[in-house]
Image (cartoon, helix red, strand yellow):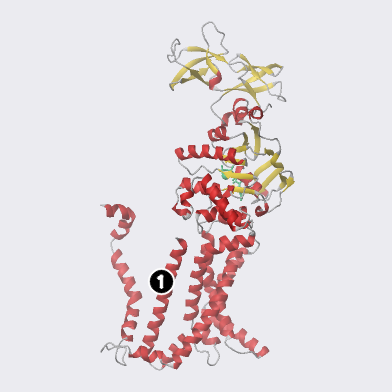
Amino acid sequence: MAEAIRKGPRARDLKAMPGFKTVAWLCIIALYLPLAVLVIFSFNDNRSVVRWTEFSFRWYEAALSNDGIRNATWVSVKIAFVATVVATAAATMAALATTRTASFRGQGLAYGIINQPLMIPEIVTAIATLSLFALIKTATGVTGIGYLMAAHTAFCIPFAFMPIRARLEDMTLVLEQAGADLYATPWQTFRHITLPLLMPGIVAGAMLAFVVSLDDVIITLMVAGPGETTLPIYILGAIRRGITPEINAVSTILVGVSVLLVVLLFFVQRRMEK
Amino acid sequence: MPETSNATQSTRSDRAAISARSLVKTFGAGENAVHALKNVDIDIRENEFFTLLGPSGCGKTTLLRMIAGFELPTSGTILLDGQEITALPPYKRPVNTVFQSYALFPHMTVAENIGFGLKMLGRPADNVQGRVEKMLALVQLEAMANRRTDQLSGGQQQRVALARALAPEPKVLLLDEPLAALDLKLRKNMQLELKSLQAETGITFVFVTHDQEEALTMSDRIAVMRSGEILQIGAPKDIYERPTHRFVADFIGDINILEGEIAGAGGGTAQVRLKDGTTISARLAEGMAQTGPAAVAIRPEAARIAGQGETADLTGTLENVVYFGAASYLHLRLNSGEEFVLRQPGGLDGHDLSRGARLGIAIQPGRARVLE
Ligand SMILES: Nc1ncnc2c1ncn2[C@@H]1O[C@H](COP(=O)(O)OP(=O)(O)OP(=O)(O)O)[C@@H](O)[C@H]1O
Ligand SMILES: [Mg+2]
């Protein structure tokens, strides 16, 4: 009785719909069965990724002591870190400019331009970036990992932008007006009111940017110079030589890291919104 | 118009805290233009409880936001203590606002909220601390100092908003329907609290409401607004007893408005011939037209049933009696077809109050008024 009252009528209605459970379970299976297979076989004490023999950590040991994997991880983290910091800062400014300034001509256009990279096929962006960088390289003679970082920063911006802008749109202007009313200069209002309230959005944007950068294959493949192998690129190369449980182990670690990030994000946001 | 409030409130000065001169605000342009304020002139005095009263959309919030600095006027000027502040940003004005939604900072404690203004003004921390404690005591929230604001009830949030706005000791406090979200009982309590806070602090309050009763009970003076214009400014008594404008009369309290034509005028009094042929005398405010069609306003409590042998000013047919104990409201139909309501104090004995009875109506001398 108390249970029914607490859950309310809506909660029961949805569950009572015919086939609701079946569909829900199909979705969950489609999403997580492949992952489960990947994780299970990373613990297989055998070279095969389809025939289970015995539980072991040997592929994790192999992966962690593999110099190729270690270098690739380091490159990935470096690039993701730089791209995240720069993209999040840029996205925050863009979000403020499109929501917190007096509306200006071309505001809608600016919004469109920021989000456009999400619509353009990644391969096109990749080729475009490659062409531009080739031009710059021949003109200046400068090479290095900076190009890859710049490319990652660029495609991370719209991902960081989305949650930040969403958060800003949810925040009513009246709090900032209250700040100004209480003698806070525009900078103080930003520092003491807008920024703290925006933090959950910024953290979400940063984490999204980090994951997207860590994940990227196509643009990296095009832009990366010699020796600039990121983890996904390394995995791709390794698969060409045949899937080994070592790859499963690395992938499982990647999955673990993203799950950790999501859980962290959840707690950070809950703490800040409390 | 005589100022009845000045005699009793000798501490008030007549110096203006806030003045608006020919203030115009138009939103949008061309066909879609909204004329939120059309040429508003107003002087709000030091230390007074001033109320902007009017129906939804009449421009109350717009006027308040321009005084606070959130909105620039299309034309006209705003003065604070005689200094022009029309274009000054909000953070440079010694004016604080109590927002209708309270707008408390959710990431700060009650004490941090209250101290925010002083901190932004650069006051030393111990100074801020002392003032915050004083404000907490003033609004009786000492026990809540370290709570987050979302753990407070509506009434408590309201008091935090008040304390936060009062802490920096502004010259003028703006309150935009601050009681609208509270239930009736809390609302009545807060009305009293607000009124005594204003008296205690001596700060000029500019209060917005569309509740006429609230305006009458709390204010030193009221400005009645309609569609971007101020129709009448005066003490509650002036506005209630001497409305100069038909809208004001109708908006505030119950009133009978009878149509007629001025038959003769002189000495501040007009003889108005009503539609049913009777002529009654009504006060004519200075500067009003001495001829032509006119409406006469009579409050229900300014009329009673004419006694035996007394000459009646009006005659009507009784339609309905609503008994309220201390008084009864009698609904009569005049020969012209107009309805007339009167408030008959005391018992109803000695009168024929059957439906359809013909009754004479006596109007207190001087209480019938001609409206613009
Ligand atoms: N930013 C704006 N843009 C366009 N029109 C506006 C804007 N702000 C107010 N208005 C219009 O100006 C008029 C006055 O609005 P205002 O908010 O001052 O009314 P109000 O008297 O406070 O009403 P309420 O009692 O409903 O709060 C309204 O017609 C409103 O639609
Ligand atoms: Mg309003």
Asked if residue B133 lies left or right of residue A103, the reply is left
| Subunit under mark 1 | A
Q: Could one spot residue B33 in this view of the protein?
A: no
Quadrant for the N terminus of chain B, please. Answer: top right
> Can you name the residue that lies furthest to the right here?
B83
Residue at 69 percent of width and 38 percent of height:
B43
Residue nearest the observer in this picture, A179 or A162: A179
Disc 1 residue lies near ligand 1 with CB under 8 A: no
* A259 up-or-down from B318: above or below: below
Asked if residue B283 lies left or right of residue A164, the reply is right
Residue B161: x and y in percent read: 54, 49
Quadrant for the C terminus of chain B, please. Answer: top right
* A49 up-or-down from B302: above or below: below
Residue B305: x and y in percent read: 51, 14
Which residue matches tag 1?
Answer: A263
* B178 up-or-down from A261: above or below: above
Q: Quadrant of residue A18?
A: bottom left
**Callout 1 secondary element:** helix
Asked if residue A123 lies left or right of residue B266, the reply is left
Residue A120: x and y in percent read: 54, 75
Residue at 44 percent of width and 23 percent of height:
B324
Q: Quadrant of residue B221?
A: top right
Residue B42: x and y in percent read: 69, 38
> Can you name the residue that lies furthest to the top here?
B309
Residue at 50 percent of width and 12 percent of height:
B359
Total numbered circles: 1
Q: Amino acid at mark 1?
A: Val
Q: Could one spot residue A14 in this view of the protein?
A: yes
Could you classify mark 1 by the number of other residues whose Cα lies within 10 Å: few (under 14), some (14-19), or many (20 or more)? few
Residue nearest the observer in this picture, A22 or A189: A189
